[in-house]
Image (tube, grey):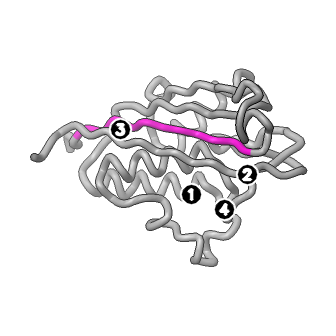
Amino acid sequence: MNSNIRIGVGHDTHRLAAGGPLYLGGVKIPHDKHAVGHSDADVLLHAIVDALLGAAQLGDIGEMFPNTDPANRGRDSAEMLHQAMQAVRNAGWEVINLDCIVHAERPKLSPYKTEIRQRIADVLDLARDQIGLKGKTGEGVGPVGAEEAVMAQCVALLRRGSG
């Protein structure tokens, strides 16, 4: 069955370590911890990449940007997101909207939500109102609640492009 509408789900988790800053949604957030990863470890952008690629049936972030490739060490996740979005558009898809959740005990996401949504919109060439973003804590439970990890989830809704 070939559909003109597709949904993709993305998820990412990174361990936290001492020393900031923390990158979320392409925004540098002052914090006493940073996410540990091969690239800049931006869990939100990684979840979005996976959601977009999954919806378009283009694989996943590990296939497009393998951690075995030295070019991806320390890489800006916004570059990865931009490249993934180009692949999605080249495959004939356009984004209707994204709905994302960041799970972190600290820092609180509220002061940064507008800036993060705008940064994502700018990278993807979308309107800010196409980007939903929510912040959740771990309520002191599990790796997120213990401030050992940060996690993000994203759902992407795509439609067959009109052009």
Badge number at residue 95: 3
Badge 2 or badge 4: first in the primary sequence:
2
Instruction: Identify the residue at image location x=65%, y=33%.
Output: 103
Label 4: which residue?
Answer: 39
Please state which of residues 138 and 54 is positioned toward the viewer in this rendering. Answer: 138
Asked where in the image residue 94 lies, by quadrant, the reply is top left
Label 2: which residue?
Answer: 15
User: Label 1: few (<14), some or many (≥20) within 10 Å?
Assistant: few
Closest to the camera, between mark 2 and mark 4, is: 2
Q: Is residue 114 left or right of residue 1?
A: right
Badge 2 or badge 1: first in the primary sequence:
2
User: Label 3: few (<14), some or many (≥20) within 10 Å?
Assistant: many
Instruction: Identify the residue at image location x=70%, y=65%.
Output: 74
Residue stretch in magenta: 149-159
Please state which of residues 148 and 57 is positioned toward the viewer in this rendering. Answer: 148
Instruction: Identify the residue at image location x=39%, y=55%.
Output: 86
Q: Is residue 95 left or right of residue 6?
A: right
Is 112 part of what is drawn in magenta?
A: no
How far across and down, in percent of the image, does residue 93 sit? 27, 46
* Proximity of marks 4 and 3: CB atoms separated by less than 8 Å: no
- Amino acid at the residue labelled 3: Val
